[in-house]
Amino acid sequence: MNCREIERLLGPYRDGELDPERSADVAVHQRNCEDCRAALERLEQLSAAIESAPRYPASPELRARLESRFADGRQPYGRWLLLAAGLAAAALVIGRLTPVADLRPQDALANEVVRAHLRSLVVGHLWDVAASGHHTVKPWLAAKLDFPFDVEDISSRGLLLAGGRVDSVDGRTVAVLVYRRGGHVISVFVWPAAQPPDRPPAGRSVHGFNVIDWRADGLNWWAVSDLELGELNELPLSPCFLPAHETLGG
Amino acid sequence: MPLSRHARFAAAILPHLDRAHNLARWLLANRQDAEDAVQDSYLRALTYFDSFHGRDGRAWLLAIVRNTCFERLRKNRRHLELPVEHIELARDTSPDPEALQLQLADQAAVRRGLESLPAEFREVLVLREMEGLSYQQIARVTEAPLGTVMSRLARARRRFEEALAAARKEETA
């Protein structure tokens, strides 16, 4: 393909919207073509610029107004009913999850991390320690955990570390890194793996949430979000998506 | 226990409030209009809630929000009225006041660049770059064919690049 054809594909390539074949064509071409490489870099810079633009969340007044309006048509206890509705909905989801004993271990774990993610959303307690500046989350987690925790922050374009918390999965204490992307929350659960071999990322859907898990550097990793599986898989969450020198863990 | 219609609505649609407001605010470029549009959108969403079968409550709501906003834009012809409001800084990790100043100036340029674009271009950039929607989702929200989404996004990026360069020049002038 020539540069003119490639140029048309650079945006979709950057957005992860090309089929594997054409994506490979673009990847090869831009390695050998300075102009197209520069054009791709400009796209990245535009994206980074928009990332720095202000976001406008709803004001507390608007939120309160809508919550009390919609939580229940008639009654004035909006917030409480909404919370109750949220809990009831969560209970429905949690209740519908298959009992742990009946499942293969990975499915059981997937259910557990989805429950933990959902719990944090429903209770509104996403993190114990908020990320402020560099290096606040890691030392905090390292001090709370019963295993060595030396994990690099994988924030990148569009993926922001919001905080960290300690949770419980599989009967043990685990670290949770909470990332945000746009309006989405992504919980990344990390704990030591019992068996050594690394495992490439595998994705699944559990009751409306998408889960990707992998094993690397002696750690189990589970990422949960309402992002679509494809989008979740595009994020540089696992070491497979990073250049070798940036691998996670230690 | 079956949930009431209101409770189901609240659970499926209310969580997307911040995204709805962000889109409306970027499209209408005015705080009061954005709040009104979001409130209208939620009322409409409740009216049409029985037609919501999917799992993608976000795309469903954003489609209603953008339609409400474009109706308002058509009615008011206020594309160009852009009052300056305070800028919410992205997380600042730099204590250096000079670097902070530069960062502020650049964020102002980014915002001005975005705001100077036609609403259709702002929309597609907000949906793709801020909300991280796939082309397929953007096509659903904007009720446009996939090919249109792709060419609109490409044009929006080109226009934004020019507008950003101009705004940055002005900021540093």
Image (cartoon, coloured by chain):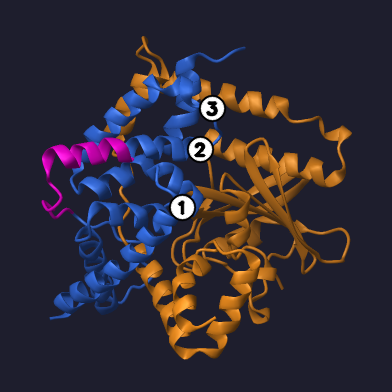
Q: Colour of chain B?
A: blue
Question: Horizontal and vertical percent for residue A13?
Answer: 52, 69
Pointer 1 residue: B146
- Is residue B82 rendered magenta in the image? yes
Quarter the C terminus of chain A occupies: bottom right
Q: Looking at this view, is B103 or A50 the one in front?
A: A50
In what element is the residue under mark 3? loop
Q: Are marks 1 and 3 on the same chain?
A: yes
Residue A162: percent from left, percent from top = 49, 55
Q: CA distance from mark 1 to mark 3?
A: 22 Å
Residue at x 57%, y 51% (from the top left corner): A186
Span highlighted in magenta in the image? B66-85
Amino acid tagged 1: Leu
Tell me the mark number nearer the camera, choosing from 1 and 3.
Answer: 1
Neighbor class of circle 1 (other Cα within 10 Å; few <14, some 14-19, many 20+) is some
Task: Determine whether the residue tagged by mark 1 lies in a helix, strand or loop.
Answer: helix
Residue A67 visible: yes
- Mark 1 falls within which chain? B
Residue B53 image label: 3
The first of marks 1 and 3 along the sequence is 3
Q: Residue B167: which disc?
A: none
**Label 2 sits on residue:** A124
For badge 2, the amino acid type reads: Gly
